[in-house]
Every structure is written in structure tokens, then in C-alpha cells.
Amino acid sequence: MKGAVVELSNVTVKRDGRILLDSVTWTILQGQHWALLGANGSGKTLTLKMLLGHLWPSEGAVAVLGHAFGSYDLRKLRRHIGWVNFDIQYQFMIRRESVADVVVSGQFGTIGIFDQPVTDEHRLTAKAMLERVQIGALIERRFDTLSFGEQKRVLIARALMTEPRLLILDEPCTGLDPAARERFLHSVADLAAAGGHTILFVTHHTEELLPFLSHTLLLKEGRVLAQGMTPEVITSENLSKTFSVPLRMQTVEGRYWTQPC
């Protein structure tokens, strides 16, 4: 489809006789920002692995950024996808690298030793990316001395080094206290407002869905329970089905808050 950033067509994943994803069809168009919401074990991580080309479907077709899987070099494709998750954060947490080196590593898709020379241009770009997420002053700090929230912003700056068309934030608020979470979420909203990237925000907390997330897909046990415009998808009925517990949803100033019935 013209203008599609992601296209999954009847995608099914089977392992050891079990169906892990079941006939998932999903299209993300340029200019949209999506939330992927589901309980633990719903298939969110499998779906991300699919988009990154780390997992192949048993049935169905996958296309990302206009390239059908099986007809394009996925190593080249991944350079246009920014991915931020806790695993990457943890790997950098146990190292003693500067913020500058962590961000520059996004240019090469590496963690640690670079396989190409680091130029002044790379470092200027890293500075610009840190400024974009409002932490340019931290460039000379060591990554492991930063707060959790600051580390997450650094990793977004790292993901932006190649100007990705698709930016995937995988449970990005894990480990943040409420104040840090709000600061982080609003920095992501500012990034969305600046344009140039399609954001896919993966979570299981409805209160993290800021208004810039125009669309939402709900996954339950590997199946699409609902998808579409966020205000139409995030309902008490859909959330109760998604998390298998009676929930009541309230909207307060554009935010979605849930509590047990």
C-alpha cells in the first residue's frame, strides 16, 4: 500500500505446534503514530521481532517501509528503524562509556567497539540528537551515572542517529517513577510533533497513551482484539477483554486511566 510504513497481512507464527500470532493484519500509514497495547504474553514482543526481521512468519506477508520481506536486504532496512528497549539500556548500563559514545554507536548499529572511525561529524550529529530530546548538556557524562529517565532519552537520541523513518519504543517507561515518566512522555510527544518519524509505542499501561498516539492496536493471546483510532479503541469493554479483568476507563484531559470495577 502506498504510504504504508508497516504492512502485516494475515501473519501467523507457529512454534512447536502452538500458534503464537494468529492471522494478524495491520497497516501503519505515514503520518500516524500507533500504540501497541496488550498484557504480558499477548504477542507484543513477537510482533516487534517480526517488524525488525528477527522472526519470520509461518504464514502471511510482512512489509516494512515499503519493502516486502524476502525481497530486500533486512540489514539495510534496519538502519531505517530506530529501536529502544530495556535490553539495550541494560547492556549500556553495565559499561562505562560516555553518553557521546553511546549515541554515536547508533550510527553503526553496535554496542561498544566501533568498526568504523568516529568522526567530528558523528559527534556533532550526536550532540544535535541529544539536543532534540532536550539533554544536550549530558553529552560528556558517563552513561551509567545518569538517571533512568535520562538514559532512556539518550537511547532515543542513539536511535535517531540514522534519521529512522520508524521509531519503536518498547515499554520505554519501565523503571521510571511517575515524575520521570511524565517528563519522558512529553519529550516523546515533542519528538512526534517535530515530524519526520512514525512512532510505535509499545506498552501495557493506558495512562502512557498521550494524545499524539493517534491509533492503537490491542493484542490478546496473539490475536488482534481491536485496532483503529485511539479514542474508539480504548474503551472499558475492550480493555476488560484485553486484560481479562473487569476495568473501567476514564478520560481525563486526553489521558486514559483505568481501574478495576
Image (cartoon, rainbow, N blue to C red):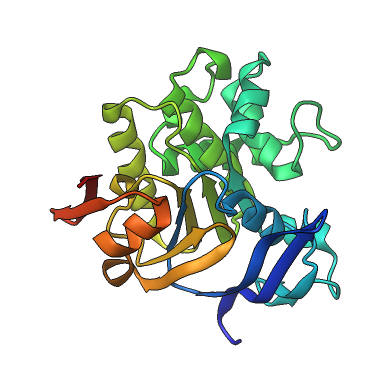
Relative horizontal placement of residue 111, taking residue 141 as reference (left or right): right
User: Does 192 sit above or below residue 233?
Assistant: above
Residue 120 visible to the viewer? no
Where residue 55 sits: x, y (%)? 77, 56
Dividing the picture into quarters, in which one does residue 111 lie?
top right
Taking the spot 64% from the left edge, 68% from the top edge, the residue there is 22
Taking the spot 45% from the left edge, 23% from the top edge, the residue there is 148
Q: Residue furthest left?
A: 253
Compare residues 261 and 106 and report the one nearer the observer. 261
Where residue 227 sits: x, y (%)? 43, 71
Relative horizontal placement of residue 27, taking residue 245 as reference (left or right): right
Q: How many marks?
A: 0
Compare residues 249 and 187 and report the one nearer the observer. 249
Dividing the picture into quarters, in which one does residue 184 lie?
top left
Dividing the picture into quarters, in which one does residue 11 lie?
bottom right
Location of the N terminus (image quadrant): bottom right
Where residue 38 sits: x, y (%)? 47, 52
Where residue 78 sits: x, y (%)? 73, 56
Residue 86 visible to the viewer? yes
Compare residues 197 and 56 and report the one nearer the observer. 56
Relative horizontal placement of residue 246, taking residue 173 as reference (left or right): left
Taking the spot 28% from the left edge, 63% from the top edge, the residue there is 237
Taking the spot 52% from the left edge, 17% from the top edge, the residue there is 141
User: Does 87 sit above or below residue 159?
Assistant: above
